[in-house]
Image (spheres, rainbow, N blue to C red):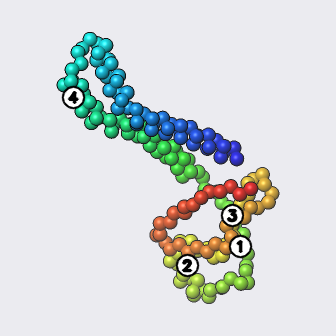
Amino acid sequence: METRSSEVTHLTTRKYLDAWCVFFWAATPTLFSLFTFGLFALMGHQLDAATVFTCLALFNNLISPLNSFPWVINGLIDAIVSTRRLSRFLSCSESKREVEQTADSSSPVLSNEQSAANFNDMAIVIHDACCAWSCSNEKEWNMVLNHVTLDLPKGSFVAIIGEVRHVP
């Protein structure tokens, strides 16, 4: 719950940053023109129609890159955070988990010839598996997956995508 609370705090900060980006996206053309023409007048120059219209045409060409700059920064921050998280995950050491295999009389049993032929082409074969996990400080196992069957051929590219939920 502490991790989720921290994540919500960071997401809230990010949404405020997004709101400021939208504000600047909407206000940039006006503010940019006001500041430029104000500084131009304060420096003692005379504003005429030709100068103003030429500058406004130039500003309109520059608005899109100026408005996208905050989103570029936001995207770079997201990419850096994601890269760090992936790097941390991929550099973790491998850990061996205890696998308990139980015989189930209702599950079909293949003959030795059939199983050898099927398993040679498979990278992973899981049939009617029930998987559980527990934190080191918990004594009870929490059921995570129940009755899972999975056959992955060698050389296949697989991604598991879905919602991560905390079940108390």
What kind of element bears circle 3?
strand
User: Is 46 placed above or below 166 here?
Assistant: above
Dot 3 crowding, Cα within 10 Å, few <14, some 14–19, many 20+: few
Q: CA distance from mark 4 to mark 2?
A: 73 Å
Depth-wise, is mark 1 or mark 4 nearer the camera?
4
**Residue type marked 2:** Phe
Q: Earlier in the sequence, mark 2 or mark 3?
A: 2
Q: Residue furthest right?
A: 139
**Residue type marked 1:** Gln
What kind of element bears circle 2?
helix
Residue 158 position, x and y percent, is: 50, 66
Residues at marks 1 and 3 touching, judged by CB atoms closer than 8 Å: no
Is residue 73 at all visible to an observer of this figure? no
Depth-wise, is mark 4 or mark 2 nearer the camera?
4
Q: Earlier in the sequence, mark 4 or mark 2?
A: 4
Dot 4 crowding, Cα within 10 Å, few <14, some 14–19, many 20+: few
Q: CA distance from mark 3 to mark 4?
A: 65 Å
- Look at mark 2 in the image and give the residue it sits on: 119
Depth-wise, is mark 2 or mark 3 nearer the camera?
3
Q: Earlier in the sequence, mark 1 or mark 4?
A: 4
Q: Nearer the viewer, residue 160 or 168?
A: 168
Residue 22 position, x and y percent, is: 45, 38
**Residue type marked 4:** Thr
